[in-house]
Amino acid sequence: MLLLCLGLPLCQAAGRTGAAVTAHPIATNAAMNAFERGGNAVDATVAAALALGVVDGFNSGIGGGCFMLIRKPNGSFVAIDGRETAPLKADRDMYLRDGKAKPELSRTGALAIGVPGALAAYDLAIRQHGNIDLAEHLGQAATVAEQGFALDDAYLSRLGQVVKKLRKFPGSASIFLNAEGNAWPSGHRLKQPDLARSYRSIARHSADWFYRGPFALKTEQWMSANGGLINRKDLASYKAKRREPVRTIYRGHEIVGFPPPSSGGVHVAQILNILEPFDLASMAPDSAEFVHLVTEAMRLAFADRAHWLGDADFAAVPKGLASKKYARRLAKKIDPTKAAPVDAHSTPSNAGTNLFGKHTTHFSTADTEGWWVTCTATVNTTFGSGVVIPGTGIVMNNEMDDFSAQPGAPNVFGLIGAEANAIAPGKRPLSSMSPTIVLRDGKPIFTVGAAGGPTIITQVVLAIIQVVDFGKSPTEALGRARFHHQWKPDRLLVEKTLGQAIIDALLAKGHTVEIVNTLGAAQSIGLGQDGKAFRGSPDPRGRGAFTVRHNE
């Protein structure tokens, strides 16, 4: 998964400033190059995303999907939904064998692949808001793919996890493995000429090459030969959607997040609303008291997620989940002294009538000053389905695993779901991606988002709390020890840096604790105290890079 946070504030006398933070220095450079060529933050986002599809392709690419949250210079917001969809021939029981879910079918190979949406979203964003043609961004990224890049330890660590999966698919093995079928050595220069040709073909013929042309035909032929469902009609009918963001106010700050099919915006808001009655600022930010309270709020929200959340075009998703009134009711269930089991979801008022809309919003052309963009993209697990459509270089997602294959059956992240997230033709699977923008007095002060499956939601919540409640900078916030609870399984994941004394205190409160080295990877851009200069915050756990550019 990739996360992009970019911004272009309204300039003062010093001139225009562009900033970018991404998971890879080459992608950050691509974003800055877009600024230098006269682009705005939307251009920089798309340039970085296409570059990440080359240098970080195990996480994201045009064979996957994305969510992009944009704050326009006039202060309005738009959420562009490039989430994958289920093929038109999909059915709710497609992964059941002898009445039980067979996880491998939704995680590897042809049946795991959803109809990709990232390219359609990038195309829509550029056409509506960019200054530079998509073809130029594709050409820049194609050059990176042709010239190649040296594989570092981070890339090779992920590659080493999926060698067996990639060996199953010649189109993938021929790119990412050597002649003996093993991972390339450290420092190997990985060139991807097929991906470069695909990028250049899209640049010449538009996104139609992908959705209605040669790529669609190649995909249909490969699917037919390998037991898959996607055909040219699936690709031709795909549309990126424009949605209305989710908003809440937390201690005087406006939190703007992504709506369903993301669960992020709803449950980031819900967790913060549950916690608002508690005086978190009076607690130490690394105390057992603080971790316990936030964990209990996470537990309550994820129980609701499992029952209520899904694609709002198909499922009845109550807006009341993010309401203050409902959150106060849930907050009363928290015992400050001990962990309390949550047996099932709760129900907000008017759950059957006050719903997220089944329509999309319009957005208009804006000028080039004052843009803030945060984008999360993914192919789901490492190298997605493991499939590269031969001759294209495009890694295909395995987002079908994000549906509920069977009520109560966990996906690869251990998440369970219900009818709201059941498979249906053309439906978008539920996601945890949570691109978020935080405002104070109507002005953006920082963006935040993360990679890491369901921990994305809790990473974003923790970053916001550290900034708003404890006065930390975004950089300091991302460096704090993280923890995560998702209701099922009933375990509290904590980073080892939290410390044994705190862990022992949490055990004494009745939590089942599992210690991990690290949780997720977040990125942020914020403004300095002067309200003008950007401060970027790549996650200290990774190799991300931040760059700022001034035009004098």
Image (cartoon, rainbow, N blue to C red):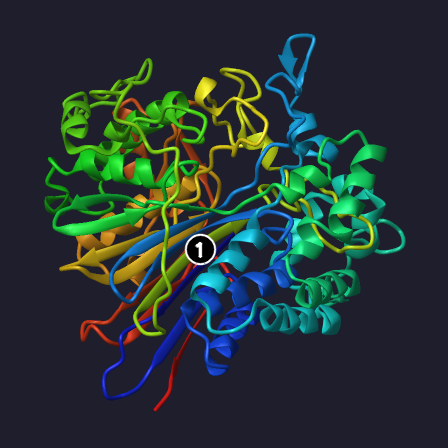
**Residue 514: percent from left, percent from top:** 43, 32
Residue that badge 1 annotates:
375
Q: Quadrant of residue 190?
A: bottom right
**Residue 519: percent from left, percent from top:** 44, 45
Q: Is residue 251 visible?
A: yes
Viewer-nearest residue: 101 or 443: 443
In the displayed structure, 324 sits above or below 96; it is below
Question: In the image, what residue occupies the spot 30% across and 26% down?
Answer: 318
Viewer-nearest residue: 277 or 324: 324
In the displayed structure, 386 sits above or below 274; it is below
Outermost residue to the bottom: 552
Q: Considering the numbered disc 1 on the image, is that residue within a helix, a strand or a loop?
A: strand
Circle 1: residue type: Cys
In the displayed structure, 209 sits above or below 15; it is above
**Residue 314: percent from left, percent from top:** 45, 26
Q: Quadrant of residue 297?
A: top left
Question: In the image, what residue occupies the spot 46% across and 68% down?
Answer: 130
Outermost residue to the right: 179
Task: Give left or right: position of 55 versus 409.
Answer: right
Question: In the image, what residue occupies the spot 77% across and 55% down?
Answer: 392
In the displayed structure, 493 sits above or below 198; it is above
Question: Number of numbered discs present?
Answer: 1
Quadrant in the picture for the C terminus: bottom left
Crowd band around label 1 with a 10 angstrom C-alpha radius: few (<14), some (14–19), many (20+): many
Task: Give left or right: position of 279 versus 304.
Answer: left
Task: Give left or right: position of 27 versus 539.
Answer: right
